[in-house]
Amino acid sequence: MDRLSIVWEWHDGSYDRAQFTRQPSGWRVTGRHGDTRYMIGLDNGFTCQSLEVTSDAAGLTLNRTSAGWFETNTGLVPNSAKAVDLDLGWTAVTNTFPIKRLMQKAQDESTFDVLMISGPDLGMRVVEQTYKRWEDGWVYANVSSGFTADLTVDKSGLVTDYPGLCSRKDLS
């Protein structure tokens, strides 16, 4: 797979469109949900390396460094040194990255720090999340808030159903 396009329909009637494109150093994921556009850079192991987001309300550019996530306008994001992933609250695509890493390692469960970004203001906070394999997918838990969801995924680890939020649409 060098290119893959995905669409999720959200229960509020909106759509999230994402495209994975193979790059020499990993993957580029571009997407759009409403007026919010994003581009995520991933290494070959599906670890987040960069993010650019623009919306009518705000813009954000982040790069992962050994010290944590660096935001171009404000500097180092506090407490982000161990945050290996980004969680964009308006798309299911970011759930795919930790799932794919766990599948590659044949690992059934992991807990880690994540830099969560909310919309439309693009506020950032570090949270603890857990992914645990179950028969049809993965149980996702935001340990910091207590939120959980049973995510259904395809054989590649891409979310097909996020109960209460969105479902993937068939593009064929």
Image (cartoon, grey):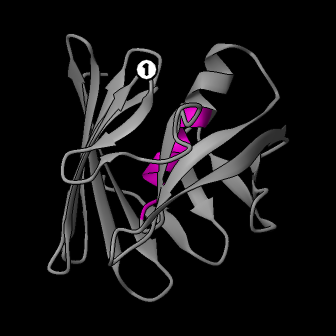
Q: To which quarter of the image does residue 138 belong?
A: top right
The crowding category of the residue bearing disc 1, from other C-alpha atoms within 10 Å (few below 14, some 14 to 19, many at least 20), is few
Q: Is 93 included in the stretch rendered in magenta?
A: yes
Give the image location of residue 86, x and y in percent. 47, 46
Residue stretch rendered in magenta on the structure: 91-98
Task: Decide whether residue 120 is among the magenta residues.
Answer: no
**Picture residue at 59% right of the left edge, 24% below the top:** 101
Residue 121 in the figure: left or right of residue 108: left
What amino acid type is highlighted by mark number 1? Ser
Q: Position of residue 159 (x, y in %)?
A: 55, 50
Q: Position of residue 48 (x, y in %)?
A: 41, 32
Q: Which is more toward the observer, 57 or 33? A: 57
Depth check: give the residue in front, 71 or 93: 71
Q: Is residue 10 left or right of residue 20?
A: right
The answer to which image quadrant residue 91 occupies is: bottom left
Q: Give the left or right position of residue 16, taking residue 102 as reference.
A: left
Q: Which residue is mark 1?
A: 66
